[in-house]
């Protein structure tokens, strides 16, 4: 039995997972319209490659990746592009972003799909390109483009591949049900990932102990493989990347580094399934499994939902009672965020739509002053000092925030969960991170502007120096001309004498003109022959061109004759 290591901190909130696991994966009717944000991942937004009015097929690329850290977007169904404009998107800040709207034709007409069941015959780079072109991003976290993550892993020796199937957030059961019903396909996806990573020495699947049916399904699917299914104790947030790596291996990821820096790559189980579909089936990422739950919904269930589906369409099919809902949450109660509207679309990273009743998740109590109880520090899985970070965030002390490793915070919400003063600690940390990043970017922009200014000054100084050199040269030349003893007339006479000395004798001039006359007559004969051919079979334009050539050659002959006659006289 594999040794496990215990992470610091963590909490045990009510799981509330049973209610959404009573039914298998469901499917919803295609909505009338789909709204596809072009930024559903970490990195640069995709760029539209379609126009309003275009007819698109299911699976067709409608936006291309715009950099090394980006991901394309594909049409989840067939239909017509009806809008390309900024729309509100699902984000904690309530931001807007460029979106593409598709009006569905309900025909589900697919593009031609080209799967690669023989992917092992392809190079790791070729398989990685297939994953990137399918728009696969991480489905369990922040949406890091999967090909970029695997490519980063390939640049360093990777000895361990970890598949994250913990799904520790309360209410969410999307990975649980996916593993129960499609474990074999997840294992196929793990095989693809292993090929891209040049076959790591060990492959571990970490899954929490509260998923017995999923554990059995994984063990059955892994029987003929070297993949090891490791059951870890149920504790939130064991599914954090750094936390799971430590639990399974006892190795800590240093601050500011990635798992690949210590020879590991961590991939979500849902992402492995999407990679299988992308490479073996040839299907881009246009749908995902997500949980719809909460007491304000008459039906709690997991669905395979098309990316871009409005939340309102999903809730309508789940007997949603708006007056019973305290607030709509995208994600879980710990790391999710409230939605400003039910018309916002599902994106690639949407794991859950939570519609709790007023008694299930009451309205938040007013924030009270910190009493320095220390519970937040005990709960922090990253061994940070949340209380200190809170004070520094309030005073906007960016230097001390970074010194206290603010960016190691995984925003799990454990500190906020245990806080007796109801302080929204994660909101403070998230805001401070954004401010620090903006400050860094501003400094970078200022440095670039200063560099451009300094370069311009150097360029202007060089140009001025060059002009000064020219001015000095002209001044010196003028002085020399003034002091010269030769008059302008002497200079002209000397030039005339040199010209006469270079002039040919009359006999030489006559011989040269005779040769020129002979050559001119030959060119006239050739031009007349081309004109005759054009008159027989050429177009009017060709005839006009050749006629002009004949006239030009004739004039040259006459001109040369006149010059020769003048010389003889």
Image (cartoon, grey):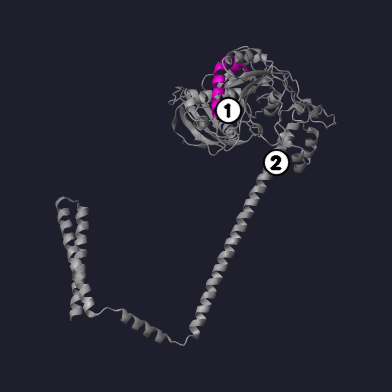
Give the labeled residue for mark 2.
435
Image quarter where the N terminus lies is top right
Decide if residue 126 is on the left or right side of residue 219: left
Q: Where is 523 relative to 281, above or below? A: below
Q: Which picture quadrant has residue 150?
A: top right
Horizontally, residue 245 falls left or right of residue 308, namely: right
Q: Is residue 186 located in the magenta-colored stretch of the structure?
A: yes
The magenta span reads: 176-197
Vertically, is 411 above or below 401?
above
> Residue 567 occupies which quadrant of the picture?
bottom left
Whole-angstrom CA distance, mark 1 to mark 2, is: 26 Å
Q: Where is residue 143 in the image (x, y as percent from the top left)?
A: 60, 30
Q: Which of 387 and 86 is in front in this view?
A: 387
Q: Which of marks 1 and 2 is nearer the N terminus?
A: 1
Say whether residue 357 is left or right of residue 180.
Answer: right
In the image, taking residue 386 as reference, residue 186 lies left or right, namely left
Q: Say few, some or many: other residues with alpha carbon within 10 Å of mark 1 (under 14 / 14 to 19 / 20 or more).
A: many
The residue located at (42%, 26%) in the rendering is 112
Q: In which quarter of the image is the C terminus?
A: bottom left
Label 2 neighbourhood size at 10 Å, few (<14), some (14-19), many (20+)? some
In this view of the protein, which residue sits in the foreground, 154 or 453? 154
| Residue 287 can be seen, yes or no | no
Which residue is at 65% across, 25% downward? 331
Image disc number at residue 348 = 1
Residue at disc 2, secondary structure: helix
Q: Say whether residue 388 is magenta.
A: no
């Amino acid at each position: 039995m594999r040794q496990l290591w215990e992470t610091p901190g963590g909490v045990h909130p009510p799981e509330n997972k049973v209610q959404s696991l009573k039914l298998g994966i469901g499917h919803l009717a295609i909505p009338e319209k789909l709204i596809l944000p072009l930024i559903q991942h970490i990195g640069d937004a995709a760029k539209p490659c379609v126009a309003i009015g275009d007819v698109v097929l299911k699976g067709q690329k409608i936006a291309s990746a715009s950099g090394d850290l980006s991901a394309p977007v594909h049409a989840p169904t067939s239909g017509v592009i009806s809008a390309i404009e900024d729309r509100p998107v699902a984000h904690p800040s309530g931001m807007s972003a460029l979106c593409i709207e598709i009006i569905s034709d309900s025909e589900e007409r697919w593009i031609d799909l080209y799967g690669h069941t023989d992917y092992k015959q392809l190079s790791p780079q070729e398989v990685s390109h297939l994953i990137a072109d399918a728009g696969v991003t991480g489905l369990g976290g922040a949406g890091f483009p999967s090909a970029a993550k695997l490519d980063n892993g390939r640049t360093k020796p990777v000895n361990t591949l970890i598949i994250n199937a913990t799904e520790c957030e309360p209410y969410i059961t999307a990975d649980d049900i996916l593993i129960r019903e499609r474990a074999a396909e997840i294992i196929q996806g793990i095989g693809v990932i292993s090929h891209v990573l040049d076959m790591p020495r060990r492959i571990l699947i970490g899954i929490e102990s509260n998923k017995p049916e999923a554990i059995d399904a994984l063990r059955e699917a892994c029987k003929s493989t070297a993949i090891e299914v490791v059951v870890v104790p149920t504790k939130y947030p064991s599914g954090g990347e750094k936390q799971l790596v430590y639990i399974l291996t006892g190795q800590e990821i240093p601050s500011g580094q990635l798992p690949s820096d210590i020879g590991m790559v961590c991939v979500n189980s849902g992402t492995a399934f999407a990679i299988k579909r992308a490479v073996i089936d040839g299907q881009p990422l246009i749908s995902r499994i997500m949980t719809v739950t909460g007491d304000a919904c008459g039906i709690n269930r997991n669905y395979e939902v098309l990316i871009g589906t409005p939340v309102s369409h999903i809730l309508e099919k789940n007997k949603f009672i708006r007056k019973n809902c305290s607030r709509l949450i995208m994600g879980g109660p710990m790391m999710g965020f409230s939605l400003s509207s039910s018309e916002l679309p599902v994106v690639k990273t949407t794991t859950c739509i939570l519609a709790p009743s007023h008694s299930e998740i009451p309205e938040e109590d007013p924030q009270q002053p910190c009493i320095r109880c220390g519970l937040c520090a005990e709960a922090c899985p990253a061994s940070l000092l949340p209380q200190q970070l809170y004070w520094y965030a309030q005073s906007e002390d960016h230097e001390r925030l970074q010194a206290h490793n603010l960016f190691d915070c995984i925003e799990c919400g454990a500190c906020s969960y245990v806080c007796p003063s109801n302080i929204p600690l994660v909101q403070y940390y998230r805001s401070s991170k954004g401010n620090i990043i903006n400050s860094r970017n501003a400094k970078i922009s200022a440095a670039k502007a200063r560099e451009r200014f300094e370069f311009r000054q150097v360029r202007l100084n060089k140009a001025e120096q060059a002009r000064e050199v020219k001015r000095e040269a002209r001044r010196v030349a003028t002085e020399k001309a003034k002091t010269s003893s030769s008059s302008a007339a002497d200079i002209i006479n000397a030039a005339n004498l040199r010209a006469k000395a270079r002039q040919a004798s009359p006999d030489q001039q006559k011989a040269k003109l005779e040769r020129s006359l002979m050559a001119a007559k030959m060119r006239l004969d050739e031009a007349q022959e081309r004109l005759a051919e054009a008159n027989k079979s050429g177009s009017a334009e060709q005839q006009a061109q050749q006629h002009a050539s004949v006239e030009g050659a004739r004039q040259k002959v006459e001109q040369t004759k006149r010059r020769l006659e003048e010389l003889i006289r």
